Structure formats: C-alpha cells, structure tokens
C-alpha cells in the first residue's frame, strides 16, 4: 500500500468511526488546541475504554503518516 492510499484509508477509518457516533471532522481549524487552552484547568470526562483504544490507534496512525513523510504535522501529532 502506498503512502497516499494509507492516508486516504486512515481518513476513511476515522470518518467512519466518527459517523457511527454522530461526530465529524472539522474542515478548518486555527490550530491543534483552542486559543487560550490551559490543560491544568481541563475538566472534561475521561474517555471510555473503546474511545481510549481508538484514540491510541489514531495516534499510531498519525505517527506512521509522519514517518511516511508528512513531517509538517509532526508537532501537532506530538501535542496530541
């Protein structure tokens, strides 16, 4: 599988997972984190087991995409 196909399949998998939960990917963002974000004040609920597993898989996919040559997203992936 080529790198372009890998990225397309990764996006398809993430969109499918989100669709099943009534969620979607944002098309435009100003950055990885919201302006003024302060992690020490984070109060959102912890992820459930399924969500945590998917998050870890998604991070693994993103790290592999960086290794394939998308170094432009390396910083953002590291912040996640």
Image (spheres, helix red, strand yellow):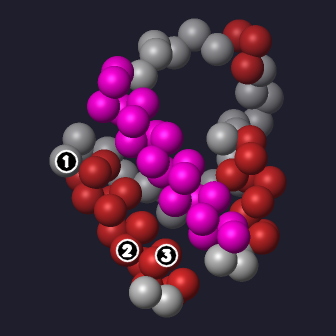
In the displayed structure, 32 sits above or below 49; it is below
- The residue labelled by disc 3 is 7
Range covered by the magenta-colored residues:
48-67
Whole-Å distance between the Cαs marked 3 and 2?
Answer: 5 Å
Mark 3–mark 2 contact, CB under 8 Å?
yes
- The residue labelled by disc 1 is 20
Whole-Å distance between the Cαs marked 3 and 1?
Answer: 20 Å
- Whichever of callouts 1 and 2 sits on the residue coming sooner in the sequence is 2
- Whichever of callouts 3 and 1 sits on the residue coming sooner in the sequence is 3
Q: Residues within 10 Å of mark 3 (few under 14, many from 20)?
A: some
Where residue 9 is drawn, which disc sits there? 2
User: Residue 46, position in %: x, y?
Assistant: 46, 16
Which residue is located at x 57 percent, y 10 percent? 43
Element marked by disc 3: helix
The quadrant where residue 47 appears: top left
Q: Residues within 10 Å of mark 2 (few under 14, many from 20)?
A: few
Element marked by disc 1: loop
User: Residue 11, position in %: x, y?
Assistant: 41, 67
Q: State the residue in front, 68 or 40.
A: 68
């Amino acid at each position: 599988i080529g790198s372009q196909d890998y990225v397309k399949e990764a996006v398809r998998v993430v969109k499918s997972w989100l669709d099943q939960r009534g969620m979607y990917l944002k098309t435009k963002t100003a950055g990885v984190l919201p302006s003024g974000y302060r992690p020490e004040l984070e109060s959102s609920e912890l992820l459930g087991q399924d969500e945590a597993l998917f998050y870890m898989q998604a991070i693994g996919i993103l790290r592999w995409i960086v290794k394939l040559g998308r170094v432009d997203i390396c910083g953002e992936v590291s912040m996640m």
